[in-house]
Image: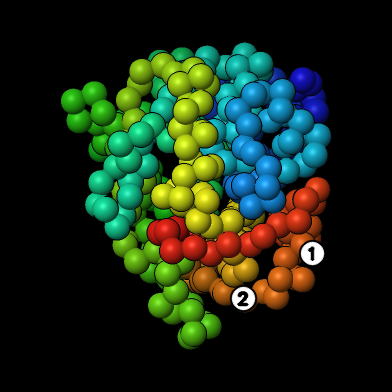
């Protein structure tokens, strides 16, 4: 595995050689605008692998994306290879309909230490919940970013990541009540502790998430990619584009229903994804918002 190939994949020119916050921010932003958050393997009859060599081949060589356990594993490897002080962490994702955090550790994120400060870096949540900058590990501090205001809160050794969102304007009236739209202005995202993890800690959950009928990942096919102004999302055959801060404290959310024969071209032109097998797009009944 070649770090230069990773830099080329994310379009990073490697002009700076400092292991500082600016470099960390640039790496995160380049990755989220080049590598989609997606689970398309599941809906093409393939598996989502955790082996780093396989992930590198899929994402870097084949120019695909992946879900958090893959894209953040790759990010963890790249940052470590560059010389950053990194720690792999595990998170518990908030389930809005159930109003509780997942019982299983289903999310991988990365802690980076620079000097006397710690940061959370996560390139694998996608959609409008994706952080665009590292978050300082500071409890109760509002950290405004382009997508939203993020807030980390610590209670008895557990950290909680929340998001304060803008209003949203949907010009396509038939989609105003879409189940894909986030309804909450204050959104809980996930919880985590600072206990170091290894990729082996996620193996059983990685299998469960891509095989269980109860998993949102088997219920829905999705692909999302950040842009300089917003985020594209494809869920099943529904394409959306969210433009952040379209007006003061308002995001613009545009919807388009695709014919199945359009999806392959949209994946290539918008997300840069070319699939080796036929995708069976799915929009099941599990809760998943953009």
- In this figure, what is the number of numbered marks? 2
Element on which disc 2 rests: strand
Mark 1, residue position: 265
Q: Is residue 248 visible?
A: no
x and y, in percent, of residue 229 in the image: 60, 59
Residue at position x 33%, y 50% from top? 95
Percent position (x, y) of residue 225?
63, 52
Q: Nearer the viewer, residue 31 or 16?
A: 31
Corner quadrant of residue 32:
top right
What is the CA distance from the residue labelled 2 to the residue labelled 1? 14 Å
Drawn side of residue 280 relative to residue 125, left or right: right
Residue at the spot of label 2: 256
Query: Is residue 73 visible in this depiction of the protein?
Result: yes
Left or right of 210 in this view: 100: left
Picture quarter containing residue 27? Answer: top right
The N terminus, quarter of image:
top right
Q: Is residue 39 above or below residue 17?
A: below
Which of the two labelled residues, at mark 2 and mark 1, occupies the earlier sequence position? 2
Q: Give percent across and percent down for residue 56.
A: 72, 29
255 and 19: which is toward the camera: 255
In the image, residue 99 above or below residue 67: below
Rendered image: mark on residue 167: none
Image x and y of residue 155, in percent: 20, 30
Seen as rendered, the residue at the extreme bottom is 173
Q: Residue at x 70, y 75 (%)?
A: 259
Structural crowding at the residue carrying mark 2, measured as other residues with C-alpha within 10 Å and reported as few (<14), some (14–19) or many (≥20): few
Q: Residues within 10 Å of mark 1 (few under 14, many from 20)?
A: few
- Residue drawn where x is 45% and y is 21% of the image: 201
> What's the residue at 18%, 25% (across, down)?
156
């Amino acid at each position: 595995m070649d770090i230069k190939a990773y830099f080329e994949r994310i379009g990073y020119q490697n002009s700076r050689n400092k292991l500082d916050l600016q470099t960390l921010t640039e790496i995160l932003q380049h990755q989220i605008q080049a590598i989609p958050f997606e689970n398309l393997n599941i809906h093409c009859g393939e598996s989502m692998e955790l082996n780093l060599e396989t992930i590198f081949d899929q994402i870097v060589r084949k120019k695909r994306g992946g879900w958090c356990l893959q894209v953040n594993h790759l990010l963890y490897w790249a940052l470590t290879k560059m010389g950053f002080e990194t720690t792999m962490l595990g998170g518990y994702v908030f389930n809005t309909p159930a109003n509780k955090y997942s019982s299983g550790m289903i999310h991988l994120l990365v802690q980076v230490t620079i000097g006397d400060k710690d940061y959370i870096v996560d390139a694998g949540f996608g959609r409008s919940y994706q952080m665009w900058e590292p978050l300082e590990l500071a409890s109760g501090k509002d950290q405004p970013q382009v997508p939203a205001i993020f807030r980390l809160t610590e209670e008895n050794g557990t950290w909680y990541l929340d998001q304060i969102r803008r209003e949203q304007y949907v010009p396509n009236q038939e989609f105003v009540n879409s189940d894909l739209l986030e309804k909450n202005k204050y959104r809980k995202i996930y919880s985590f502790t600072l206990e170091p993890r290894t990729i082996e800690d996620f193996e059983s959950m990685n299998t469960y998430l891509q095989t269980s009928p109860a998993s949102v990942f088997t219920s829905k096919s999705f692909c999302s990619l950040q842009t300089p102004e917003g985020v594209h999302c494809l869920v099943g055959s529904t394409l959306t584009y969210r433009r952040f801060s379209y007006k003061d404290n308002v995001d613009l959310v545009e919807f388009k229903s695709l014919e199945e024969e359009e999806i392959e071209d949209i994946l290539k032109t918008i997300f840069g994804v070319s699939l080796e097998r036929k995708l069976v797009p799915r929009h099941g009944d599990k809760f998943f918002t953009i």
